[in-house]
Image (cartoon, coloured by chain):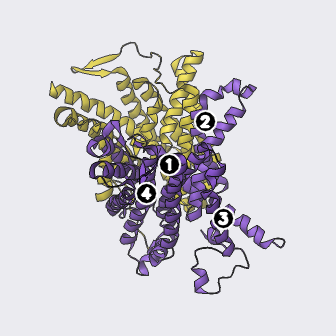
């Protein structure tokens, strides 16, 4: 029994971890290309999930259409946020950037609560069967799908950065902004693209999360859970973000297992990632793959 | 940064004594004295609701002052100030309930205890800076919130802790009007204290650490020491504000000190002005009055088509919350130096009138 429970938790942890990885990836994308620490990443998930839910519930269009419309909307949303809010703050000290994204997160959370209420709304049924049986393990279809989608996003991310011209431009900008600019890369486009992609990917994660657990403002907490993941992986490493997300997802479910089986103190699933975060910052502040800041005078 | 410290022309600091003075000029000193005098007599002409708002401004201003010393003067970002505020509130209630120390002494002792906790937190925090520190304090916020809900010997757990009203010489300070004077007393003390801390060697060291920490270190300033010290001082003020808060409400609940409150403190110092003592007060006043203004706005719109279309009256809590986010964004974009800078501009305009440059 206990072993089954552990395996079940680890599978769930793995899939949730993949989802963390996706969100962490979109966080890292923004940080890497425009040096903005986005405390409002969770609200991107929330806005995306609510937009998709609204389209489905209001117009009862097929899921894939609602999904595509949501992606389109989130693309515009990301670009608008970048142009209106973040652009005037280029070159300001880091506290201003952090505060403006915190302000954004409060603002959008309040607006979403206002528009859609504070109660959890379930997503309309999308899959015919609730859960699948794989090797004797009960896996929710939505979880399985979320895992597949996460892996799909990660692969397309890798291809995008490796093969496409815009991806190359973004890598160049992340590497050296001035050099990229002098070689004809349009920084404006790169910033806008980074925010648009990040918002779209977040929206996918938000929709997936909404399908699994229903939509409430709790989704926005993913945006905070992302910090342990990105710190573990290194703030400016996409690969690190994925690994960090996986490790944090597994870690919190393992902590939950230990909590339920041995300690019985409760709430450890929520708090364990933050202990991990503090420990990582103490012993390895730049994470596994992060670039070390070397300061010369 | 230079913008904030700029002085109007004609304000020459011709001696060290003048440069180190607490107030810009005699007029500033008189203005503040006049303001305090007005506040002392305010119970005569303000009703008890407005007095309670003033009390809120008072203890929030003390806590914001602490955060401003940390963020505005030392350049260390903290997203977990609310837990120190909460720790002060719980510590004061705990001291009073378990050791029968009079409340009047509990408040400063709680502040000192909070300062010790802050020093403890400052030791790991001194190793990281900037963004990493912000994320570390964010984690500390959640860990401490978790601690509050577990440590029922200290906080009363989910039931919360009850805090006795303040009593001096047999007089209970349990009404708004009476308690107002206690808060005013501590506000004046802590603002004088903070101003003076910033005039000392340690205060100048904080500024040096903020402006260029490498140069500061080369000039012989012990970075680790001052970063930890700054955390301690900031927590002291947070604890003081929290203790006053606890004994005002007579009840401390573990749910008050969440991340929203931390963000509100950050908003106060951003709006008031980073690195400005009087800005902390202005920011606290702004953030306390903002929900009231939104409330008033919604009520004055009641019955109009706008109200009917958006059903504003039901959405007041969301409007208040959204307005907090919005003012943070708007201030950062349009007035990044805060209200204190604007106030300085207004003072300068009057000083230079009619020949402004």
Residue denoted by label 2 = B319
Name chain A's colour: yellow
Q: Distance between the residues labelled 3 and 1?
A: 32 Å
Q: Quick check: marks 4 and 1 in contact, CB under 8 Å?
A: no
Q: Could you tell me which secondary element the residue under label 1 belongs to?
A: helix
Residue B16 versus residue A258 in the image, above or below: below
Q: Quadrant of residue B23?
A: bottom right
Residue A153 picture location, percent across and down: 43, 35
Q: Is mark 2 on a helix, strand or loop?
A: helix
Q: Residue B210 carries which label?
A: none
Chain in purple, by letter, is B
Tell which circle, 4 or 1, labels the residue nearer the N-terminal end.
4
- Mark 2 → mark 1, Cα distance in angstroms: 17 Å
Tell which circle, 2 or 1, labels the residue nearer the N-terminal end.
1
The reply to whether residue A209 is visible in this rendering is yes
Quadrant holding the N terminus of chain A = top left
Q: First in sequence: mark 4 or mark 2?
A: 4
Q: Mark 3 points at which residue?
A: B34
Q: Mark 4 points at which residue?
A: B240
- Label 1: how many residues lie within 10 Å, few (<14), some (14-19) or many (20+)? many
Q: Mark 2 lies on which chain?
A: B
Q: Residue B208: give x, y in percent of width and height.
A: 49, 74
Q: Position of residue A41 (x, y in %)?
A: 49, 41
Extreme-right residue of the structure = B354
Q: In this rendering, would B172 be left or right of A192?
A: left
Q: Earlier in the sequence, mark 3 or mark 4?
A: 3
3D distance between C-alphas at marks 4 and 2: 30 Å
Frontmost of labels 4 and 2 is 4
Q: Are marks 2 and 1 in contact (CB under 8 Å)?
A: no
């Amino acid at each position: 029994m206990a072993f089954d429970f552990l395996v079940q938790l680890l599978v769930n942890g793995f899939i949730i971890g993949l989802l963390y990885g996706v969100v962490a990836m979109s966080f890292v994308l923004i940080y890497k290309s425009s040096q903005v620490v986005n405390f409002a990443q969770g609200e991107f998930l929330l806005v995306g999930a609510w937009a998709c839910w609204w389209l489905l519930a209001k117009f009862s269009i097929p899921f894939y259409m609602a999904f595509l419309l949501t992606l389109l909307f989130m693309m515009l949303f990301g670009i608008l946020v970048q142009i209106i809010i973040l652009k005037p703050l280029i070159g300001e000290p880091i506290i201003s950037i952090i505060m403006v994204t915190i302000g954004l997160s409060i603002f959008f959370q309040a607006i979403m609560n206002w528009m859609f209420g504070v109660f959890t709304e379930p997503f309309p049924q999308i899959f015919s069967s609730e859960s699948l049986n794989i090797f004797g393990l009960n896996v929710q279809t939505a979880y399985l799908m979320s895992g597949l989608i996460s892996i799909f996003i990660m692969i397309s991310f890798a291809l995008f950065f490796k093969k496409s011209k815009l991806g190359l431009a973004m890598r160049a900008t992340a590497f050296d902004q001035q050099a990229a600019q002098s070689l004809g890369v349009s920084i404006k486009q790169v910033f806008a693209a980074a925010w648009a992609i990040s918002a779209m990917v977040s929206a996918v994660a938000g929709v997936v999360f909404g399908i699994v657990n229903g939509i409430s403002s709790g989704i926005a907490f993913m945006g905070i859970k992302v910090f342990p993941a990105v710190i573990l992986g290194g703030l400016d490493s996409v690969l690190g973000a994925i690994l960090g997300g996986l490790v944090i997802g597994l870690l919190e479910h393992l902590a939950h297992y230990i909590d339920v089986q041995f300690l019985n103190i409760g709430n450890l699933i929520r708090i364990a990632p933050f202990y991990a975060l503090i420990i990582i910052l103490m012993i390895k502040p730049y994470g596994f793959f992060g670039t070390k800041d070397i300061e010369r005078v | 940064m230079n913008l904030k410290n700029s002085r109007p022309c004609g304000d020459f600091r011709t001696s060290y004594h003048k440069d180190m003075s607490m107030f810009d000029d005699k007029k500033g000193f008189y203005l503040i004295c006049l303001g305090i005098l007005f506040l002392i007599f305010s119970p005569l002409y303000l009703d008890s609701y407005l007095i309670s708002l003033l009390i809120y401004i008072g203890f929030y201003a003390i806590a914001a002052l602490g955060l401003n010393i940390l963020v505005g003067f030392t350049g260390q970002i903290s997203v977990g100030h609310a837990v120190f505020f909460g720790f002060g509130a719980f510590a004061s209630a705990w001291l009073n309930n378990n050791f029968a120390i009079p409340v009047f002494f509990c408040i400063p002792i709680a502040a000192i205890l909070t300062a010790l906790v802050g020093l403890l937190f400052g030791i790991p925090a001194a190793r990281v800076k900037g963004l990493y520190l912000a994320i570390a304090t964010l984690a500390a916020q959640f860990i401490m919130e978790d601690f509050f809900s577990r440590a029922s010997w200290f906080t009363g757990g989910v039931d919360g802790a009850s805090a006795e009203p303040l009593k001096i010489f047999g007089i209970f300070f349990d009404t708004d009007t009476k308690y107002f004077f206690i808060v005013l007393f501590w506000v004046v003390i802590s603002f004088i204290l903070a101003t003076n801390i910033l005039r000392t060697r340690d205060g100048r060291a904080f500024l040096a650490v903020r402006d260029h920490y490498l140069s500061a270190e080369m000039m012989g300033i012990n970075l680790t020491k001052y970063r930890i010290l700054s955390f301690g001082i900031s927590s002291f003020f947070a604890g003081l504000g929290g203790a006053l808060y606890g004994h005002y409400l007579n009840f401390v609940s573990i749910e008050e000190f969440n991340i929203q409150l931390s963000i509100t403190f950050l908003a106060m110092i951003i709006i008031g002005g980073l690195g400005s003592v009087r800005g902390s007060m202005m920011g606290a006043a702004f953030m306390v009055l903002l929900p009231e203004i939104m409330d008033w706005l919604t009520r004055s719109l009641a019955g109009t088509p706008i109200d009917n279309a958006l059903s504003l009256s039901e959405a007041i809590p969301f409007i208040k919350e959204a307005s907090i986010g919005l003012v943070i964004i708007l201030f950062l974009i349009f007035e990044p130096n805060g209200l204190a800078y604007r106030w300085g501009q207004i003072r300068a305009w009057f000083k230079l009138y009619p020949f402004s440059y």
